[in-house]
Image: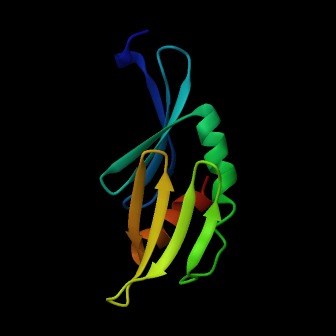
Amino acid sequence: MNSMDMKTDIVAQTDNFIVWKADEPDGETTYHLEVNNITVHFFLEEWEEFLSFKKQFIGIPKETTGILAESDSYLVNCEKIDSGDIVYNFEIPGATLFLFEDDWAELIELLRDL
């Protein structure tokens, strides 16, 4: 099987974000979370860890500040910045996503569908 034969499926989708999975040519399944112009790639073990992690924060009320969830691999916190806006910081291995309230709400909507 070559990369042209890779099978992909949409797992969940909102207007701007998407989670999709790919059955790779080597037999491994990978998961991909696209948020704005960033794509986070997960191997199966990482994906399962992420699914467990998301349960810690998807039910937290809007505008709750401070650390919302933390694990060995991930961190989500929320802070009010000088402009008065609320910013969510989502730390993943190798990157930090900074999301304003509307994008955060859409990400939560996407994650609830998983």
Residue 24 drawn above or below residue 11: above
Q: How many marks?
A: 0
Give 41 or 69, whichever is nearer the viewer: 69
Residue 24 drawn above or below residue 8: above
Tell me what residue is drawn at x 48 percent, y 57 percent. Answer: 91
Q: Position of residue 36 (x, y in %)?
A: 33, 57
Query: Looking at the rendering, which quadrant does residue 83 occupy?
Result: bottom left
Tell me what residue is drawn at x 40 percent, y 59 percent. Answer: 97
Q: Position of residue 40 (x, y in %)?
A: 43, 44
Question: Can you name the residue that lies furthest to the top here?
Answer: 1
Tell me what residue is drawn at x 69 percent, y 51 percent. Answer: 52
Give 74 or 5, whichever is nearer the viewer: 74
Q: Position of residue 59 (x, y in %)?
A: 67, 72
Q: How is the model colour-coded? A: rainbow
User: In the drawing, does residue 97 fall left or right of residue 105?
Assistant: left
Residue 30 drawn above or below residue 55: above
Tell me what residue is drawn at x 49 percent, y 72 percent. Answer: 105
Q: Position of residue 80 (x, y in %)?
A: 44, 84
Residue 71 drawn above or below residue 87: above
